[in-house]
Image: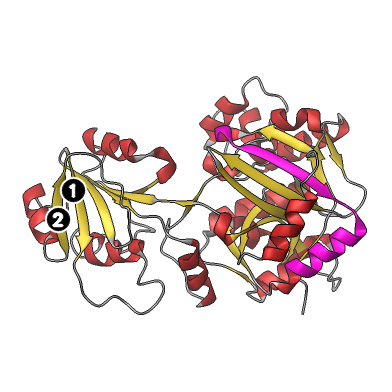
Amino acid sequence: MSALVRPFRALRPRPEHAAAVAAPPYDVVDTDEARALADGRPLSFLHVSRPEIDLPPGTDPHSGPVYERGAENLARLVESGVLVRDETPSFYVYRMSLDGHVQTGVACAASVRAYEENRIRKHELTRPDKENDRVRHIDALNAQTGPVLLAYRSSERLRELLAAASSGAPLIDADGPQNVRHSIWRVSDPATVAELERELNALGRLYIADGHHRSAAAARVAQARRSGDADASHEHFLAVAFPHDEMRILDYNRVISDLNDMTAAEFLERLGAEFQVRAAERPVKPAARRTFGMYLDGTWYALALKSGALPADPVGRLDVSLLQARVIAPLLGIADPRTDARIAFVGGVRGLAELERLVDSGRAAVAFALHPTSMEELMDVADAERLMPPKSTWFEPKLADGLLSHVLD
């Protein structure tokens, strides 16, 4: 059985360039946002992760010249000395701090074989077009530049090891996108590396929190390059693993474009069959599971699911599943939220004011605020080898692109 993780030789910015290089994950910004963020920032890793910004407007972001430009931009950062590669395989303690929230994990090379054996567990489906994009990006750069966010059931021994390894001054300490502080310590002492490797592999399983497309793409690249050498770099993917009890999931809310030919009064009446519905004087941010906020026709409502039997399976019990099964499908007529254009998803980082804005502007007829999915729920779903509904989790803070990359030798 292959190990879950191993140390690796990171490609990383020199400390003095880290803040200038750090970029948001490639998939949380569109082309226009990436172009604006990288304007006047020649070292921004967006020139590598979203290289269409350096080509004429209107360029297909999935065309060959885009991936070629990404490879050229990465090579330029290496040749100019902005990025350097460590000489020996290492682990990297990675700490993120945002608004008083702190989480400390470890960057590593995760095993593709363990991913294929479901010891690195999934909870979402992937889209072929997004997978294809990352496969072509990895192949063109011969590197994985976007880390997969992993979780593990917290371990006191790992917490002690990471605390000891991060007791000195960090190698990288930089403010990144969205005011997140990224602090990274390199762990290269052979004895400490060996102990970290033992403790991480003793976990037995890891969970993908964010980065299903990146891990799936890495597996496809490994399968295409597979030669029988289990230690080959392409048999591993870039990841940062955090203890589950330090991770923070925000709500992932829903907005619906119309009321399925109902008036607001008719919709409220039909909701009453499944929910206790109470008008509220201020925005409703659900404080407990099985409760929801709803913004309709200029008014906030608090919804509480009426007592009754809940589904036994870990997916059916999720709040996102209950809302889908009892409101969005039967009342609003949206059977498949993956494909129906009438539903959109708003990450909780945007706040409840964004829900109000969408409804008040007429772009949506109704908005629902949800209680965040918990890490325990995510792990239960993954352990049952089930999949969550789309857009069930929004992790915050997010890892930065560019601070650590995994070169495929």
Give how far apart the Cα atoms at labels 1 and 2 are.
Answer: 7 Å
Tell me which corner region of the image, top left, top right, bottom left or bottom right, holds residue 8. bottom right
Left/right placement of residue 398 relative to residue 74 reads left
Q: Measuring 86% from the left and 59% from the top, which residue is drawn there?
A: 192
The residue at which mark 2 appears reads as 277
Residue 301's disc number = 1
Q: Is residue 58 visible?
A: no
Q: Is residue 68 visible?
A: yes
Q: Measuring 86% from the left and 71% from the top, which residue is drawn there?
A: 229
Dot 2: within a 10 Å radius of its alpha carbon, few (fewer than 14), some, or many (20 or more) residues?
many
Mark 1 residue type: Tyr
Q: Secondary structure at mark 1?
A: strand
| Nearer the observer, 1 or 167 | 167
Dot 1: within a 10 Å radius of its alpha carbon, few (fewer than 14), some, or many (20 or more) residues?
many
Where is 378 relative to 171, above or below?
below
Tell me which corner region of the image, top left, top right, bottom left or bottom right, holds residue 114. bottom right
Q: Position of residue 296 (x, y in %)?
A: 18, 44
Mark 1 and mark 2 residues within 8 Å of each other at the beta carbon = yes
Q: Secondary structure at mark 2?
A: strand
Left/right placement of residue 382 relative to residue 236 reads left
Q: Measuring 35% from the left and 61% from the top, which residue is drawn there?
A: 320
Q: Position of residue 377 (x, y in %)?
A: 46, 67
Tell me which corner region of the image, top left, top right, bottom left or bottom right, holds residue 331. bottom left
Mark 2 residue type: Val
| Colour style of the rendered protein structure | secondary structure
Q: Which residues are magenta?
A: 178-200
